[in-house]
Image (cartoon, rainbow, N blue to C red):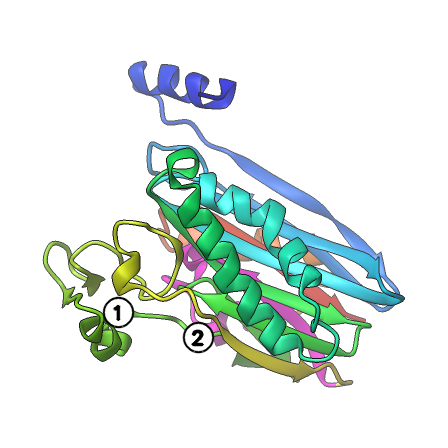
Amino acid sequence: MTGREILHKMKLKAGFCGSETGRGKSKMWKNVAHGFEFVKGKACHPMEDYVVSEFKKVDGHDLGLFAIFDGHLGHDVARYLQTNLFDNILKEKDFWTDTENAIRNAYISTDAVILEQSLKLGKGGSTAVTGILIDGKMLVVANVGDSRAVMSKNGVAYQLSVDHEPSKEQKEIESRGGFVSNIPGDVPRVDGQLAVARAFGDKSLKIHLSSEPDITHQTIDDETEFIVFASDGIWKVITNQEAVDVIKSIKDPQAAAKELIEEAVSKKSKDDISCIVVRFQ
């Protein structure tokens, strides 16, 4: 058990859940600025969201790597993804020739490793939304679960990811021997447990879940203003267009991410919330 988890257990025994916040100072690369903010929700467990927001040079190309990993039933799977998923994607031999296939293969192979290490990483899982910005010109977004990417073009919101809701994939879940139920609770859940149809990990449910991502490609043009990557703590209470409207006039991306989180909290979001804003100058 880590020192952080021991401290957390001590706080629980004292009846104090506490709070946790963090931010990534806005950084500039050529004509692209990015920053992030996160805040722990009301639940009495350690923060389960993890963020990647960085630029790096790979094979002579400039890559922007952005991701939100929203863990459930523990944070170890999300933390593992933060450390390993992009490395696994970039190690795929066909990354430059068939980027979509490389990402898909890396998602599936990474999930296989997580399942193999379930004794170490625990029984939980994680959603994911990832974005790879290639030379500032092309964005490839992939996701499993309900963390989401939204692009603003001329002030209009466009969703770049797919919310993998059990009700939408009920036939696929049932074909694997599972079921979708609103009991217990008030939202559809796989086998009455998990409120997303695709995720990393979740070994006890994996036979009924998929880890295959949906993938989209977007050209970055003069109409592209910014992109928001965020966990569902925002999207449960704010629509895509509302998110765009809230931050469209905020030039600093870290300040924009903070404002969006504060808006979600003011609308009574109780979940962990992580948000990245990538703004094109």
Magenta range is 223-247
Tell me residue 119's x, y (percent).
38, 35
Which residue is located at x 44 percent, y 70 percent?
Answer: 212
Kindly state the secondary structure of the residue where label 1 is placed: helix
- The amino acid on which the numbered mark 1 sits, given as a three-letter code, is Pro
Per the rendering, the mark at residue 166 is 1
Per the rendering, the mark at residue 99 is none
Residue 10 in which image quadrant? top left
Viewport quadrant of the N terminus: top left
Instruction: Give the answer, above or below, for where 17 lies relative to 54.
Output: above
Residue designated by label 2:
162
Residue toward you, 9 or 24 = 9
Residue 252 visible, this angle: no
Reply yes or no: does residue 45 show up in magenta.
no
Kindly state the secondary structure of the residue where label 2 is placed: loop
- The amino acid on which the numbered mark 2 sits, given as a three-letter code, is Val
How far is the residue under mark 2 from the one under mark 1? 12 Å
